[in-house]
């Protein structure tokens, strides 16, 4: 199972995360496209770092919400969503050319990601935009109990689909992430995080917060590395999944 992480989210003099330490530990980098974070030089430096470590490049588009870090919902029509994504994918693809890279997938960020998983019309618009940009470009979305419906929708649109799971987040009985507003929504115990990663990798699912087993087959596992504890968790996950050390 490949590990992915949100990177390139600094902006100007403001620094976020530890990209230089995280990049050697992951397989896929979700690179901010400038709408929720990043600027041209941040993007350029992030792509150069990914190239150095042979990490796949994913576009991480969002609502146009720099001040809110893309975490606020903004109403858009399907046509507006398509334009929003095409604009960001085009910018990142252009930056990739400097490093001899190209986009490997698309993973929407923050509120856009959350909203599309609740609204099939919005999800369809995101799928159409991804396919319009490049026919073979995969879209990464969170895996839920409705994953078969999402796979069928993607097949109808003609876009490859990657299903994503989280090692450090609690799941409800519908296979949705428990709201961060609720206690226990984010796992901090490294043993729990590693155990959940192994469940996804080896058993194709996870236990919900109430103890029910959820069948949630995933292609990639999202990890976070914005602090020292998170970095150690990534290293422990790599070891548990039998990935070679970096």
Image (spheres, helix red, strand yellow):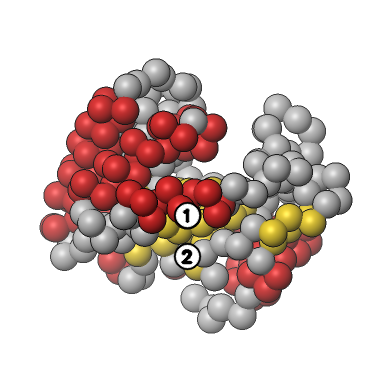
- Where is residue 5 drawn, in percent x and y? 48, 54
Q: Does residue 104 sit above or below 60 in this rendering?
A: below
Residue 197 appears in the figure: no
- Where is residue 136 drawn, in percent x and y? 26, 61
Left or right: 96 in relation to 18: left
**Residue at position x 36%, y 51% in the image:** 156
User: Which quadrant of the figure has residue 207?
Assistant: bottom right
Q: Does residue 5 sit above or below 27 in this rendering?
A: above
- Where is residue 131 drawn, in percent x and y? 26, 50
Left or right: 58 in relation to 94: right
Return the residue at label 1. Answer: 151
**Residue at position x 47%, y 54% in the image:** 151
Q: Does residue 139 sit above or below 110 in this rendering?
A: below
Residue 166 appears in the figure: yes
Q: For this rendering, which residue is in front, 232 or 210?
A: 210
Crowd around label 1: few <14 · some 14–19 · many ≥20 (10 Å): some
**Residue at position x 44%, y 67% in the image:** 27
Return the residue at label 2. Answer: 26
Most extreme residue toward the right, as rendered?
A: 211
């Amino acid at each position: 199972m490949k590990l992915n992480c949100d990177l390139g989210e600094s902006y100007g003099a403001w620094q976020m995360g530890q990209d230089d330490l995280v990049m050697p530990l992951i397989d896929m980098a979700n690179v901010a496209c400038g709408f929720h974070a990043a600027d041209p030089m941040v993007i350029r430096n992030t792509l150069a770092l990914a190239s150095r470590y042979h990490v796949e490049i994913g576009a991480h588009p969002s609502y146009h919400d720099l001040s809110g870090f893309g975490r606020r919902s903004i109403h858009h029509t399907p046509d507006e969503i398509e334009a929003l994504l095409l604009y960001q994918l085009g910018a990142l693809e252009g930056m990739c050319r400097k490093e001899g890279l190209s986009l490997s997938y698309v993973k929407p960020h923050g509120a856009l990601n959350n909203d599309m998983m609740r609204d099939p019309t919005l999800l369809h618009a995101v799928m159409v935009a991804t396919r319009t940009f490049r026919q073979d470009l995969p879209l990464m979305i969170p895996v839920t109990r409705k994953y078969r419906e999402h796979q069928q929708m993607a097949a109808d649109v003609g876009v490859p689909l990657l299903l994503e799971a989280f090692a450090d987040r609690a799941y409800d009985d519908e296979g949705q992430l428990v709201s961060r507003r609720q206690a226990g929504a984010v796992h901090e115990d490294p043993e729990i995080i590693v155990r959940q990663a192994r469940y996804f990798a080896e058993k194709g699912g996870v236990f919900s917060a109430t103890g029910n087993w959820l069948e949630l087959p995933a292609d990639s596992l999202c990890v976070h590395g914005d602090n020292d504890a998170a970095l150690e968790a990534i290293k422990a996950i790599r070891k548990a999944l039998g990935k070679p050390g970096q």
